[in-house]
Structure formats: structure tokens, C-alpha cells
Image: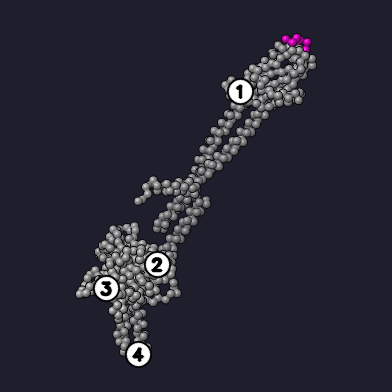
Amino acid sequence: MSAPEGARSPAPRRDRLRQAADPRSWSLALRVVLVTTLLSTLALLAVGAYLSTVIADGLYEQRRDRVLEETVEVRDELGESLAQLSGATSTQQQDAVSAFVQSTGGQGGGDRREVALVPVETTGTVFPVASSDRTLFDEVDDEFAAAVAAQPDAVSWRSIGRENETGRTEPALLVGTRVVVPGAGSYDLYLIYSLQEEQETLAFVQRVILGGGLVLLSLILGIAIAIARMVTTPLKRAAHAAERMAAGDLTSRVEVAGADELARVGESFNDMARSLEQKVDDLTELSRVQQRFVSDVSHELRTPLTTIRMASSVLDSRRQELPGELQRTTELLAAQVQRFEVLLADLLEISRFDAGAAQLEALREDMDALVMRAVEDVRPLAGARGCLLDVRLGEGASTAVVDARRVDRILRNLLTNAIEHGAGSPVLVQTAGDEDAVAVVVQDFGHGISPEDARRVFDRFWRADPSRARTLGGTGLGLSISASDAHLHGGWLQAWGQEGEGAVFRLTLPRRPGTELVRSPLRLERPFDRALADAAVSPTPTGEIRIGPDLLPDLDTTDLDHPAVEDAAARHPEGEGPAEDDPAEEKDAGAR
């Protein structure tokens, strides 16, 4: 049972999200704009914070200096007023001090300044007086009062926060100094100066800086987009031109404008494209000339080869009449002439493929019958090499619309190749089919090939081990022609193997011309252990009896206990002849 869709979707979704979050997958223009915007934002924040700090310090220091000057002036005025009241009564002194505090606290713009006067050593009776409510005295703690008393001639100050009528805390400066009047006593003068006006000025400046920064950031963003487009547009044109060239349009060029670095890139790309086009044209012409040469030479060689073959046939037919040393020469001549004929036929077929003149003569054929015919053709060769052909035909219909001549050539090439490189080991031939395709696998258990060599085994004249001598006189073109035949059908011819274990070749053809193959009915990568290989496929789908040299009974004995004899007796009871006339048995016998 397959997993529900919800159980499979999180992993691909996470992969897509991870890929989208990777900056390397973003476009160059987007990365340029984002990096420029980020760096510009950081720079504007740093500049804005610096300007705000400098302006705030300037406003504070300016206001503090002015406050200290005003405090000194108030202290002097208070000293003069108290000196004039040295002979007055305590009531007159209290009234005068209250009037001075109220008038001084009202100066500077309402709540801009508050004043409090606290007697320290008096000769009369003067109580503490404040220009506003008595909460002003709460702002003066013992530490600040001690600082004022320690430096009676100086002006002490510190920053505080003071709540207004609405409950909001506003910045302020608390200033204190001591006034000593001979004959009138000593007084501590405290003044609170509001810094709300400066705070509002600073807030306004910060808003202006923030607004200007946003406007500047917008301008920088627009400039970054424009610059990114200036840089990426020529690169996009070059990329599109390269894609068109990769698709086969070698005339594609990049439009060059200007003389900057990007223009130089475009000119270099165009020079490369022209050079590549010229080289491809030269190679195409050279390939055409070579194809023409091979085709012409192949055709021209057919006439003299026919004459040589006729002469060789005459000599071979009368070989027994020749001396001993000439008999061997005649035999070698006949073998080489036959090999030359095969090579000439392969060259002619290759020239047809190169010229695009190869055509299919497709009819509905039985693939199992084609396989059995190819097996019968190579059976003498397999017998000479001591190689067992293990054929396993698939169940069901195996018909397909194919060119029988080309399929037969593919199968004979694969079987001959497996016998030659199988080192005398059995060769497994298996067929199978599904709704859209039929497949044939030829597997040997000989020298084998590596997976890397399997990708090159269909190249012309390629050999996995050039030092290994050929015993069957191959031309090096058989597998290449077989691959071309398979591609002409719209099919696959694939190879896989392991060195020292064996090789597997799989032919997959569509049942109907024009059908696009998606999968093959048979596996390509399979085990080379005989037991596992037997278990990987259905055993004897057609019911044939496997016969090998080690399974044949000893005809000189009459031991009926031998398994092969018992099996034969069971299949052919006394009084019945062998099943030579049975078509099914005749088809199964081909596996032997």
C-alpha cells in the first residue's frame, strides 16, 4: 500500500523551501539589490544614530550652560534682596522672600523654571518657600543637599525626570547653590529647569533624519535596481545566446553596445561563437568527406572483393589437391576474405546511418521466434566454445512491429559477443514483454566489463582491453551498428557489468512504432551469482528441460536411477515416441 500523499509531501516541500532560502539560487539582480539595500540601511542607521547623538549632546550642553548662567544671576539677585532686609521684621523677610521666589519662578516661560529657597542658618524666622507645590522639595535628596553644602560658592547640578500634569515624565535640570547674606543668614537655592523644549527639538530633528533616511534609501534602492539591470541585461543576452547555441543554432550572437567591460564580454562571446561555428562547419565537412570516402571505397571494393572471393572459393574447393603448406594458406585466405566481407558490410551499413539513409522495413514479428532463430544461428559457435545457451522465453504474446533483419543482426551480435567474452561459461538469454515494449537480455558470466566501460562499449572500434586477442575476427563495429539499429526502432540498447563477473546487454523495443519508451520489462542491473540469477527470473517459463554437458546421461550404461533418465522416462512413457513433432517441445528444445 502506498503512503498517503500528505505523508510524502513534507520532504519535497522542505527541499523546495530550503532551496528558495539559499541565496545562491536567487538571481544576480535580486542579490545586488538586496545587498545594496541592506548595506545602505546599516550605513543610514549608523549615520542617523551619530547625528542624533551629536545633536542631543549639543542641545543639552547649550541648555546647561545657559541654566548655570541664569542660576548665578538669580543667586546674586537673591543676595542683594536679602541684604536689604537685614533690619526688617521676620514677617517682612518672609513676604519678601516669597515674592522673590514667585517672581523668579515665573520667569523663563511658565513651567520652564521652578525655584525653592530653604533657610540653613537664619537670624530671623524664614520658612522654606517654593514657587510651585511642595513636591519640588522631594526632588532634593540628602546627597544633593550635601553636595551643595560642601561647595557653597559653586553651582551643583544634575539631570532628573519630572512628571507633568498629564503624568508624563519630562527631562529637567536640578541646580543648587548656597546664598550667604551677612546679617540675614544662609539659604540653599534650588532651581529646576525644564528640558522639554529641547527634547521636542531633538524629536523633531530625529523625525527629519528618519524621513530623509527613508527617502535616501528609496533613491538608493532605485539606483541599485537600475545598476543591476545595466549589469544583468547583457549577461542575460549572453546566456540566451549560449542556450540557443546549445540547442544547435550556431549563428546566435550577442548584441554589443559600447566599449566597456560588458561589451568586451559580448565581443569575446561572439568571437568564440564564430570560431566554434567555423570549426563545426569544418568538422561537418570533414565528416561528410569521410563518409563519402568510406561509402565510395566500400562500393568500389565490392567488385574486386567478389573476384577475390570467387578465386578463394575455387582454391578452397580444390584444397585437398594442393600441397600441405598451400592447404593452410588457402584456409587462411578463405577466413580472411570472409572477415573482409563482414568488415565491408559493416562499413556500408555505417555509411548508411551516417548519411541518414537507413530505413526500417517493419512488420509484425514474433520476438521469441527471432530470438530462437538467432540462437540456432550461433549454436555451432557456442558448441565449439563449450558454452551453454540458457534461453528463457517470456510468457504471453511477444509480437512487435520491427525490422526482422535488423533485430536479427542485433541479437546475433549480442550472442556472438557473449560467447566470445564468456570464457566458456553459460550465456543466459531472457525475453519478456509488457503492454508497451518487449525486451531481450543477454547475460554472460565471463570476463565482464566495468560500469564505466559499459558507457563506451557502443563506440566505434572501441575495445575494453586492446591487449586481449580476438578469436572470432570482430570488426569493432558490431555493437555500434546494433545500437543504431535499436535507435532506429525508437528503442534502447544498454550495457552493464562488473569486471571479472560478467556483462549484461538489454535490448528494449516498442511494440508499436512511435511509442515512447518509459521503462523496460527486464532489469538491466542484475546479480552474476548463478543461484541469484536463477532466482531473479521465473524458472523455465516455457517448461523446457535444461540440458548441459554435465546433465547428459551415460548412454553406455542402463542405470535408470540417473535423474535425467528418470525425468526422460517420466516425460516419455513406454510406447510413446519423443516429442519431436510437438511444436512446443521443438520451441523448448531451442533453449538447449
Distance between the Cα atoms at labels 2 and 1?
A: 94 Å
Q: Where is residue 66 in the image (x, y as percent from the top left)?
A: 68, 25
Segment tinted magenta in the rendering: 86-91
Distance between the Cα atoms at labels 1 and 4?
A: 135 Å
Residue topped by disc 3: 568
Given residues 180 and 300, the one toward you in this image is 180
Residue topped by disc 1: 163
**Among the two numbered marks 4 and 3 on one chain, the one whose residue lies closer to the N terminus:** 4
**Among the two numbered marks 2 and 1 on one chain, the one whose residue lies closer to the N terminus:** 1
Residue 134 appears left or right of 503? right
* Disc 2 residue type (three-letter): Asp
Numbered circle sitting on residue 323: 4
Residue topped by disc 2: 529
Name, please, the residue furthest toward the right: 182
Distance between the Cα atoms at labels 3 and 2?
A: 29 Å
Given residues 200 and 216, the one toward you in this image is 200
